[in-house]
Image: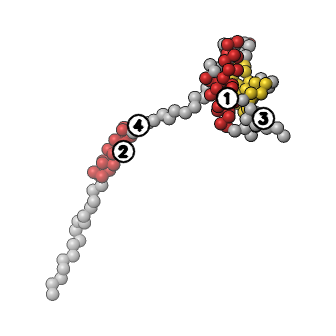
Amino acid sequence: MRKRAVRTGDEADVNITPLLDIVFILLIFFIVTATFLREKGIDVRTPEDNEDEQDTIPPPALLLAVQEDGFVRVNNIRIIDPGSVKPVVQEFIAREPNGVVLVSAAPDSESGVAVQVMDQAKSGGAPAVSLALQEERT
């Protein structure tokens, strides 16, 4: 019987340098080719601090308060249907071209009614429509 030769010399090594080169090249490729998308959302404009404007008179405002029952109060006086807001806004803008429209929604009102009122105000020609939430009554 013949004895097998025992190798005590060089053992096989795996060279990982080319593997690291390929990984870095792929990393650079994906960084360069990645597209950075800017998602469009609601444009929120915060007021800027300007000392000159503190002494000016604010523009006239039309308050449209959406109630819990779905009706709309105009300047806390008259109650109308949400679908008939457009003529009221058109009349207000005809009297006050620089006026703003404020939509104030009750906490328990349906959001669809507030959106409908905002749409009616925009289609009525209001240059600026702001949304506010009424305080909860305790």
Residue 104 in view: no
Label 3, label 4: how far apart the Cα atoms are: 44 Å
Is there CB contact under 8 Å for labels 1 and 2?
Answer: no
Q: In terms of sequence position, does the residue under pointer 1 or pointer 4 come before the other?
A: 4
Residue 66 pos. (x, y %):
73, 32
Density class for disc 1 (Cα within 10 Å; few <14, some 14-19, many ≥20) is some
Is there CB contact under 8 Å for labels 4 and 2?
Answer: no
Looking at the rendered structure, which numbered label has been put on residue 43?
none
Q: Is residue 20 left or right of residue 51?
A: left
Quarter the N terminus occupies: bottom left
How was the colour assigned to the protein in this rendering?
Answer: secondary structure
Residue tagged by mark 3? Answer: 135
Residue lying at 72% horizontally and 19% vertically, measured from the top left: 61
Residue 39 pos. (x, y %):
50, 35
Residue 93 pos. (x, y %):
67, 15
Residue lying at 62% horizontally and 19% vertically, measured from the top left: 125
Residue tagged by mark 1? Answer: 83
Label 2, label 3: how far apart the Cα atoms are: 53 Å
User: 135 above or below 122?
Assistant: below
Q: Tell me which amino acid carries mark 4.
A: Thr
Looking at the rendered structure, which numbered label has been put on residue 35?
4
